[in-house]
């Protein structure tokens, strides 16, 4: 039999409080399928959106590059081809790195590669340097695809397929404003 203590509540009500039952255990804040997992999925989507700009930026500057370098459309699309090849190769490496070390090292590498690639592309005096800059941009943009797919599903046990499908979709969100 548990003892109770009567305490005064608002007005004339009397509230009974159990003095022998312990307080419930607080929920694990980092438990899978919890709020932390959903927040992590949202942040992953946001990061993939920001990094995904690198994948689509060359399309916006393609006509300007064509005029600046005095080349035709097929030559001007070479940086995009090189960027996509660098992205394809880098996704495997960065996904493995995410599995082994977590998401932070690939994000740091992405920031360095994207930043230096965009600066180099902005100052490129010729198509060769412009294309090399887009190889760096492709390496940086790769972090927006495979690493979120490697990082998110372990946090959402009940729906890992949904998590794996939503996490890298951020790379397609920058297309809408363009």
Image: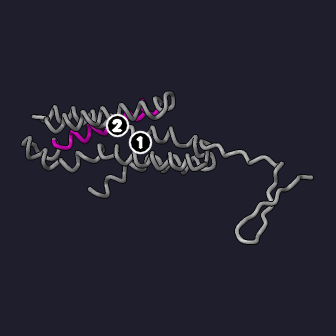
Number of residue marks: 2
Cα separation between marks 1 and 2? 9 Å
User: Compared to 93, does 142 lie above or below?
Assistant: below
Label 1, secondary structure: give it.
loop
Q: Considering the image in quadrants, where does the C terminus appear?
A: bottom left
- Whether residues under marks 1 and 2 lie with C-beta atoms below 8 angstroms apart, the answer is yes
1 or 2: tag closer to the N-terminus? 2
Q: Which residues are magenta?
A: 76-95
Label 2, secondary structure: give it.
helix
The x and y percentages for residue 145 are 41, 42
The answer to if 81 sits in the magenta stretch is yes
Magenta-colored segment: predominant secondary structure: helix
Query: Which residue in the structure is indicated by mark 1?
Result: 145
Q: Is residue 73 left or right of residue 99?
A: left
Q: Residue at x 18, y 37 (%)?
A: 121
The answer to if 19 sits in the magenta stretch is no
């Amino acid at each position: 039999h548990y003892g109770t203590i009567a305490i005064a509540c608002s007005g004339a009500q009397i509230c009974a409080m159990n003095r022998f039952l312990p307080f419930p255990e607080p929920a694990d804040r980092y438990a899978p399928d919890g709020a932390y997992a959903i927040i992590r999925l949202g942040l992953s989507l946001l990061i993939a959106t920001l990094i995904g700009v690198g994948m689509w930026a060359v399309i916006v500057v393609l006509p300007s590059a064509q005029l600046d370098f005095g080349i035709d459309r097929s030559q001007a699309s070479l940086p995009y081809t090189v960027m996509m090849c660098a992205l394809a190769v880098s996704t495997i490496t960065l996904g493995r790195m995410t599995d082994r070390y977590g998401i932070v090292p690939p994000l740091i590498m992405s920031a360095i590669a994207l930043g230096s690639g965009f600066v180099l592309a902005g100052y490129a005096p010729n198509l060769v340097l412009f294309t090399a800059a887009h190889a760096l941009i492709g390496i940086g943009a790769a972090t927006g695809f495979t690493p979120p797919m490697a990082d998110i599903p372990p946090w959402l046990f009940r729906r890992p397929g949904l998590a794996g499908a939503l996490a890298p979709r951020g790379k397609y969100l920058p297309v809408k404003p363009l």
